[in-house]
Amino acid sequence: MSSKANEFTFQNDMIRQLVANGWLLGKPENYNRELALYSEDLLGFVKETQDAQWQKFCKLYPNDPENKFLERVATQLNKADPNAANKELRTFGTLGVLRHELRDRGTRFSLCQFKPEHDLNPDTLARYQKNRLRVVPELVYSP
């Protein structure tokens, strides 16, 4: 068996395992290469879990709020200094954006919900269950 065939078999096994454990299967054409985001998941999570903040954001940016939001997230993701003395600067980059809220002109968004330590708060548990994890096979990243 060729190494290419082994790689393809391994890839498919990994994808099957991820999907079997709740991950979504994506398509390369739905990936926003310019912003390096899967827009459907980001916008879907925010709208489903933080509707009041989303409505406020839409009033602030009435012309194409979805693209404005995606661009704002991408900007925050592209900055990173995990060793910055200023705590505010540590909110940049992937981990910073996931750990801290994204803020823009008085709006605040969480881009994920970490697993609660207990199930005493049903709202937190419901938000956690709305997290979206997606695998996109054969995604070639290049703007």
Image: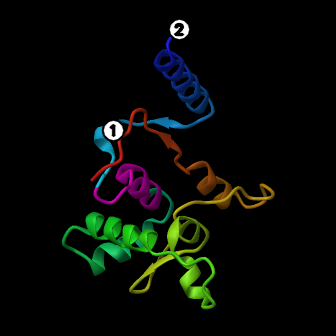
Point out the tag, 2 or 1, that comes first from the N-terminus. Answer: 2
Q: Secondary structure at mark 1?
A: helix
**Three-letter amino acid code of the residue under disc 1:** Pro
Q: Main secondary structure of the magenta part?
A: helix
Image color mode:
rainbow
Q: Position of residue 9 (x, y in %)?
A: 53, 18
Residue lying at 45% horizontally and 61% vertically, measured from the top left: 46
Residue beneath the point at 36% across and 71% down = 55
Q: Quadrant of residue 66?
A: bottom left
Q: In the displayed orientation, state which residue is furthest to the top.
A: 1
In what element is the residue under mark 2? loop
**Separation (CA) of disc 2 from disc 1:** 27 Å
Q: Which portion, as a residue range, is magenta?
A: 34-47
From the viewer's side, name the closer residue of 12 and 129: 12
Image-quadrant location for residue 58: bottom left
Say which amino acid is labelled 2.
Met
- Please tell me the numbered disc located at residue 1: 2
Residue 86 appears at what percent x and percent y? Answer: 60, 91
111 sits left or right of 99 in the view: left
Relative to 84, 66 lies left or right: left
Vertical arrangement, residue 103 with respect to residue 40, above or below = below
- Residue at position x 48%, y 15% from top? 5
Residue ID for mark 1 = 28
Q: Is residue 12 left or right of residue 58?
A: right
Whether the magenta-drawn stretch holds residue 32 is answered as: no
